[in-house]
Amino acid sequence: MPAPLDFYFDTASFYRYFASMKIEALAAKCGRTVNWRAFPLGAAYKADQELEPLTLPMKGVYIERSARFYGIAYRYPSRFPISGVVPERAFYWTHDRDPAPAKKLAQAHYHAYFVLDRDISQQDVTADVTATLGVKRDEALAALNDVAVKTRFREEVDTAIKRGVFGSPYVMVDGEPFWGVDRFDQIERWLAHGPF
Amino acid sequence: MPAPLDFYFDTASFYRYFASMKIEALAAKCGRTVNWRAFPLGAAYKADQELEPLTLPMKGVYIERSARFYGIAYRYPSRFPISGVVPERAFYWTHDRDPAPAKKLAQAHYHAYFVLDRDISQQDVTADVTATLGVKRDEALAALNDVAVKTRFREEVDTAIKRGVFGSPYVMVDGEPFWGVDRFDQIERWLAHGPF
């Protein structure tokens, strides 16, 4: 008989409740049993100030495993976290001229940061990445310091806030919000079979 | 042609990167296109102190939709958040006598809070719930105030922290951690096909 799964739950929270309703069926389907363990997350954080540094390496490994699950190239960047404001200004500057290369630029920035380990918060790096799409590098650098480009970006953020965007990644499907890569299965069902 | 999906992304983060690698295929599968929108979440929170109250009602609706997606009975409790410490002490007190009813007790507490809207942070309510499992109500109430029961619970929390539990719900599968109901698809693949 294989070992039981250890299921740590916190009684007074939504998603833990949802998990509690699914864990037994999941385990049974895979020929396992479940060992339930109450675990008050808030109390744990309060009790042990050492928790954060202790768990950070585990979170790193954890993210790498998710990347493998999704089948995506990834390595933990040597500088993390960084600001995304510079590449996002470049995104809208490109977008206002043509949306198609803007999407490619966003993808190229992710690749530069999470695969090639380049610090895309730096204007020089963003200008390099933008130049790979056939834009003149000097023109891109100038745009990043253009007040009109900065204002344009700020307006986009304000518009998103007014629409009620409260997370990221965040997908609006016919006005219906979905937050997180983990909810893509919900989007698929919504699009295929309508509202639930 | 149906409307495009609006994809809000934040450049310098893991899960948004993963989402960016999946969104186009998902949209294409469902006959949609994608409208990419850069959205720096941190900047948005800093810029607008009104964001939190504005988004809370949307989060409430959002959680209800997730409950429907999972096919789980749920309503937003009239008192939220509350502490789970009292029902979790009852859990371990029951567990040390017999693990099987302890699991039933945890499920009964979730049901009392998220379906019947009872405030399970109160000893009286937890004693009521525990009594439904055939335990004498007075005995349960006395246990909740027993120093040995409190110490036992504290030791469980310490053990979980030492094991590196950093979230909730949290599942250990042969020593491999999985955090969140959204990762249940990962657990299933792990159990069926081994490590990835």
Image: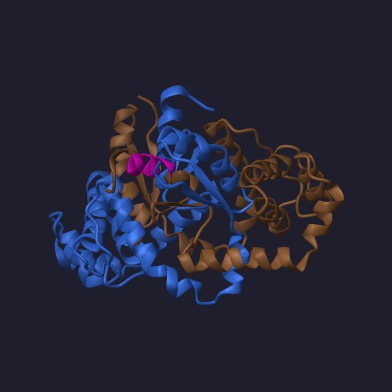
Chain colours: A brown, B blue
Please tell me how many numbered marks the rendered image carries: 0
Q: Is residue B33 visible?
A: yes
Closer to the camera in the image, A114 or B86:
A114
Quadrant of the frame with the N terminus of chain B:
top left
Determine if the magenta segment contains residue A20. Answer: no
Residue at (12, 55) in percent of width and height: B134
Query: Looking at the picture, how far across and down is residue A107, in whole percent?
Result: 65, 41
Most distant residue in the bottom direction: B49
Query: Looking at the picture, how far across and down is residue A185, in whole percent?
Result: 39, 40
Query: Looking at the picture, how far across and down is residue A162, in whole percent?
Result: 49, 69
Determine the image quadrant of residue B46: bottom right
Q: Is residue A135 left or right of residue A45?
A: right
Q: Is residue A116 left or right of residue A64?
A: right
Dominant secondary structure (helix, strand or loop) of the stretch shown in magenta:
helix
Q: Is residue B96 visible?
A: no
Quadrant of the frame with the C terminus of chain B:
top right
Q: Which segment is the magenta one?
A: A184-191
Residue at (53, 66) in percent of width and height: A159
Closer to the camera in the image, A101 or B172:
A101
Q: Is residue A118 left or right of residue B14?
A: right
Query: Looking at the picture, how far across and down is residue B95, in whole percent?
Result: 29, 50
